[in-house]
Amino acid sequence: MHTVHEAPLTRSVEDYLKVIYHLSSQGGFAATSDIAAMLEVAPPSVSGMVKRLSETGLIEHVPYRGVQLTQQGRRAALKMIRRHRILETYLTQQLGYDWGGVHEEAERLEHAVSDRLIERMAGALGEPRYDPHGAPIPTAAGEIEETELLSLAEAPVGADLELREVGTQDPARLSYFAEQGLVPGARLTVTDRQPFNGPTTVRLESAGVRVVGRELAQALRCLAAAR
Amino acid sequence: MHTVHEAPLTRSVEDYLKVIYHLSSQGGFAATSDIAAMLEVAPPSVSGMVKRLSETGLIEHVPYRGVQLTQQGRRAALKMIRRHRILETYLTQQLGYDWGGVHEEAERLEHAVSDRLIERMAGALGEPRYDPHGAPIPTAAGEIEETELLSLAEAPVGADLELREVGTQDPARLSYFAEQGLVPGARLTVTDRQPFNGPTTVRLESAGVRVVGRELAQALRCLAAAR
DNA sequence: AGTGTGAGTTAGTTTAATCTAAATCAGATC
DNA sequence: GATCTGATTTAGATTAAACTAACTCACACT
């Protein structure tokens, strides 16, 4: 299949595709209002963009239901996600950025970098497979690892887990997690959970005991630990 | 003096300021048509932008004469030039870019990077004073070295020179110069010049003899060599 | 089945940057 | 000094992305 001439996507289009990817990743449709909320934009702006995106074949729109990415749209979204995650990894490992601030910087840069630069960065880093928060980095070919992870808020008491991904971009939460030793790779055991969706208590293998409120626990995504 | 709240400049505004800086650097005014030519934009677009820029106090406009930067405009322009040159230096030294292509990449990135990132890059490079083409890098405080250089097209026969700056962004010319050993720091002696603005012949201290056409020679900016 | 509510869409305006075509100015030429 | 010419500006249209206000749809509830 020949490479088709593709007009460069504008900043906005790229952002829409990324949030549609995230919102529809758990199957199903992304709702107009959710897209609007994530982009901090009024709902009619979304309707307008949705019209253009479906005209150009990047999304499928079912009026009053929501939207889904087409193959083409998914490819474009994964490309932006790769850019974002490579940038975060590079800024962290090569330029001393900490968890706070990387996201914002990457968010701006991802629209300006060339494929060539991203691949140079990836090369300099040794083709990393995960970003600093533990999220998988799509390959240049557009494939992404899809591992089922279990949020710490749902993990059963007694489970031995490995923390794989810290699923937030909020700098305050990120630095709090980092302080608490709650970083990708940490081994932990769930020792308790308060009733009615209360906080989860865990024992960290290499540190002490932590009590994590439900909302925070939802961001911590784990895998059953290999023993 | 307190830092005034400054609205972030758009991509376009920044580009206009940069070319106005370059066009008016040899004193005097930048002409509408020259700005239009450098930005590859129609002259009326320049008139429109000039109106807005002078309203916001970044330039001084004398109708039918041209424009000049104000102090504020000059500061903004030098900031962009610093970003551009730090980026070119970083891409070249840390990510293996060669002379061709760096310019284009930096041109896009300079609008997206934060001051913080630029200063990290500058730090990683050891606060470089010159970019890969030999152009001086403005300091973070907004000062730029202004050394009088002599274009090779004007240098008298017999002069011993040090090549300081290769003043072009054209990738083809840049790689040609690099092949010929005409890079910043090269020592050379002017041995001949053909009449009527003909080519200049130079002997390179560490290589052989080169004949350089007038147009190319204009891009090579030199300093009288220390002996 | 009728209706109310909130989500979604349409209509029409705004802002920034561009364009083409038309008008105007300034300096050079005769 | 009148005129010509090319550079510059003004006028008006276009595109992309956003907004507010007003309308419409789908679906849940009685």
Image: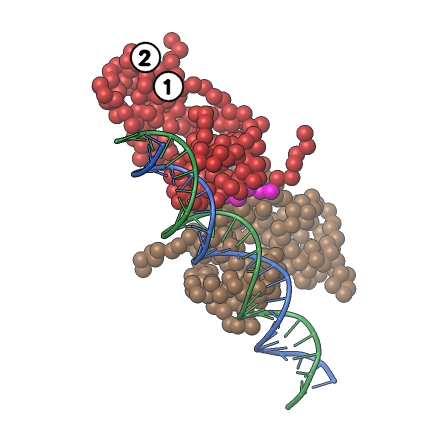
Chain colours: A brown, B red, C green, D blue
Q: Mark 1 = which residue?
A: B150
Contact, mark 2 vs mark 1 (Cβ under 8 Å): yes
Residue A36 in picture, x, y percent from top left: 59, 61
Residue B7 in picture, x, y percent from top left: 60, 42
| Residue A131 drawn in magenta | no
Q: Chain of mark 2?
A: B
Residues in magenta, as a range: B7-11
What residue is drawn where x is 63% and y is 47%? Answer: A183
Is disc 1 placed on a helix, strand or loop?
A: strand
Q: Is residue B57 left or right of residue B94?
A: right
Q: Mark 2 = which residue?
A: B159
Type of residue at label 1? Leu
Q: Is residue A190 left or right of residue B203?
A: right
Residue A160 in picture, x, y percent from top left: 65, 56
Q: Is residue A151 left or right of residue B48?
A: right
Depth check: give the residue in front, A24 or B16: B16
Q: Chain of mark 1?
A: B
Residue A89 in picture, x, y percent from top left: 53, 44
What residue is drawn where x is 49% and y is 40%? Answer: B50
Which part of the image, by quadrant, shows the N terminus of chain A? bottom left
Is disc 2 placed on a helix, strand or loop?
A: loop
Depth check: give the residue in front, A68 or D12: D12
The tag earlier along the polypeptide, 2 or 1, is 1
Quarter residue A154 falls in: bottom right
What residue is drawn where x is 27% and y is 25%? Answer: B214
Cα–Cα gap, marks 2 and 1: 11 Å
Quarter residue B219 falls in: top left
Depth check: give the residue in front, A166 or B208: B208
Label 1, residues with CA under 10 Å away: few <14, some 14-19, many ≥20: many
What residue is drawn where x is 23% and y is 21%? Answer: B196
Label 2, residues with CA under 10 Å away: few <14, some 14-19, many ≥20: some
